[in-house]
Amino acid sequence: MRPLSPLSHLILFNLLCGSLSSSCPQNCSCISVSAIFCVQQYLIYMPRGLPSSTKNLYVFQNNINTLQQQDFVELSELVMLDLSQNALSEIPDRVFSPLSSLLNLDLSSNRITQISKDSFTGLVNLERLYLYSNLIQSIHPAAFEGLENLLELKLQGNKISVLPALRLPGLLHLDLSYNSIPPLRPEDLQTPHLESLKIAGLKLTSLDEELLRSLANLHVLDVSQNLLVEIQPTLKAMGGLRNLNLTGNPLGSLKQEDFQNMVNLLELDLSNLYLQGFPEGFFNFFPKLEKLTAAENPFNCLCPLAWFPVWLKDSNVELLRMEETRCHFPLINSGKVLAKLEHKDFGCPTTTIELTSAGTSSTTSKPTNSTTPLGTTHAIPPAPPSEMPSVDIDSFPLSQTTALPRRIIEDSEEEDIMCPPTICLNGGTCIFDSNGVVCLCPPSMSGLYCEIKKEVLLPPPSPRVSIETIATVQPNTISSLHITSTSISLDLHRYIHTRPHIRGIRLTYRNLSGPDQRPLQLNVPPSYPEYTLRGLQPNSTYSVCASPLGEQVHVSVSACLEARTAGIPPSSHEPSVDRTEPSSSLIPIVVAVAVVMIAAIVATVVVTRRRRKSKAPVDMDLHETSPLELEGVKTSPENGLTHPKQPDITPCPSLIQNSLEYEAPLIQGQCPANNNVACTKPLYV
């Protein structure tokens, strides 16, 4: 048989397209014999003249507002019907009864308000039913009867207040999120083979223990955006979970014992839980973990969290929403992507090995300056003598003192050694101990950096109020603990205690004494009952207000105070000098310097004059014009002698060459005269 030529192929293609176009309804596209697309055609009614062989019909994004049974009479082979994003307000009874072969029905994003008893009658083979994003308020208790083969039911994003009992033995996937239904009970879900349950945004404060036990085959559980404050015991024991979403619940801190049985997790979402970090080794409970989401958490990127980026790279776990997983504290790391930080960026103390005569010792030096902005230092106020442990400076290991000159260490009794700022959390005080950096924690906190909250009762509000506090402290307000020239430490215990469900605190402060009084805002987690505002102007009055995060600021929910920062104290290391009058100790020095300068000037003048006199005979011997002629001295024509008008003595330079007042003459041992007269005798006119 001869192969078809290209012309023959073209003829067959045109014939096929012609046959398809002849049977394709108006305003629709027929990709194949069994798939018809009538999309975005502004249709008000279902298209007419559809081929009976149609299996997949897509009529989404139109304006269809009503359905009739005759629309589907000739579509007995239809398996897929997409009517999403239309204007349907109701589902007429038995309208889908001709579609006995239908497997997938999508009615999402319409305006349906209720589901009646016979809305889905005849759909005996239906497997997937999508009703999400409608306005459904009520569902008849028998609406889903007869759907024995239903595998997936999506009802999220409606206004359902009462959920009928779902007796669907074959159901695998159920989504009831963002409705107004009450907490589910075991009789509400008679679905023994359910694998995926999504109940997000239902305002649940707990999960029914019996319901969780009945769902032994559950692999996916989404309880995000609820009000769960703890992981319940039955949930802890669900070792078959593959996907767990806890986003947006006020769980506080994560406990390792809550997750130790979830060894089969593949995906874990811990977003928006106000987490400041993870316990080291927390993710070792999930050896099969593939995807992790931890976005929108105020992470403290300090040394206790330095292990996380390293683990993330070594384990090959994919961090979803990486750009939204950023640091909140300290200031130098604020806004940085957590996964992109290196170990040195967390400010961990460095451990060094020293070889000494006594053996090998390991010491810990203070953290690097990675947690401090370049050029800025913050002094930690020293603790009272009764609270400060004794520190022997000479007992510091060499690795801790190499960065500090010996002179500075010896003078440490007068100057406080600076601790790295923000190294101690939750109001802890940083000091230098023989082991390096040590944090003195308040009674309610523990841990290396005061990062662990003890399970103790909340202490009564601190009676300490700075003498600089101007506003009177009332109930349910904030107060100040300590004020320096550049910082104000706030006590938020009482404010947090009166609002147990607060998700965060918005601190608003502004300088009332400066020209720029624009307010500045900070968001503080509720786990910070003490917080310090830094970088303030000295000798200034500040207004500080606290309000619940995420709520509209109102007088009844906000608390304010006014506090004045201290002035800058004079340095104790500079001598006090009264600059209004000259020091009496400087007068003798000034007089002595003046006498020496005058004596030097007089000596210079005398030496200069005597030099000129000593050079005069030399000038005559060279037969040059002598300066003495200008003063009335004339030269004798007989022998060239110079005769002054008045008696004068011309000493021989050779006799006085050793005088201290003269330099050595150019010609020594001879007289500059030529008249055979002894040079020691005076010459008279």
Image (spheres, rainbow, N blue to C red):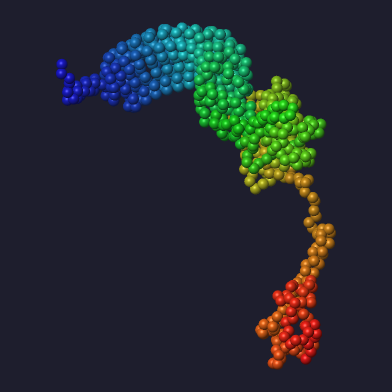
Report the residue at 61% width, 16% height from top. Answer: 258
Q: Nearer the viewer, residue 4 or 96?
A: 4
Report the residue at 70% width, 37% height from top. Answer: 402
Q: Nearer the viewer, residue 674 or 575?
A: 674
Is 185 situated left or right of 74 in this image? right
> Could you tell me residue 190's position as x and y percent?
50, 7
Q: Is residue 559 above or below residue 595?
A: above
- In this rendering, the count of numbered labels is 0
The quarter holding residue 580 reads: bottom right
Residue 163 in sight: no
- Farthest residue in the left direction? 2
Is 610 situated left or right of 296 in this image? right
> Could you tell me residue 206's position as x and y percent?
59, 16
Of the 4 image quadrants, the one containing the C terminus is bottom right
The quarter holding residue 494 reads: top right
Q: Nearer the viewer, residue 193 or 334?
A: 334
> Could you tell me residue 277's position as x and y percent?
61, 26
Report the residue at 77% width, 69% height from top. Answer: 600
Is 574 situated left or right of 29 in this image? right
Of the 4 image quadrants, the one containing the N terminus is top left
The quarter holding residue 13 reads: top left
Q: Is residue 44 above or below residue 152?
A: below
Is 583 situated left or right of 80 in this image? right
Residue 320 in sight: yes
Report the residue at 81% width, 33% height from top. Answer: 385
> Could you tell me residue 71's position as x and y percent?
31, 16
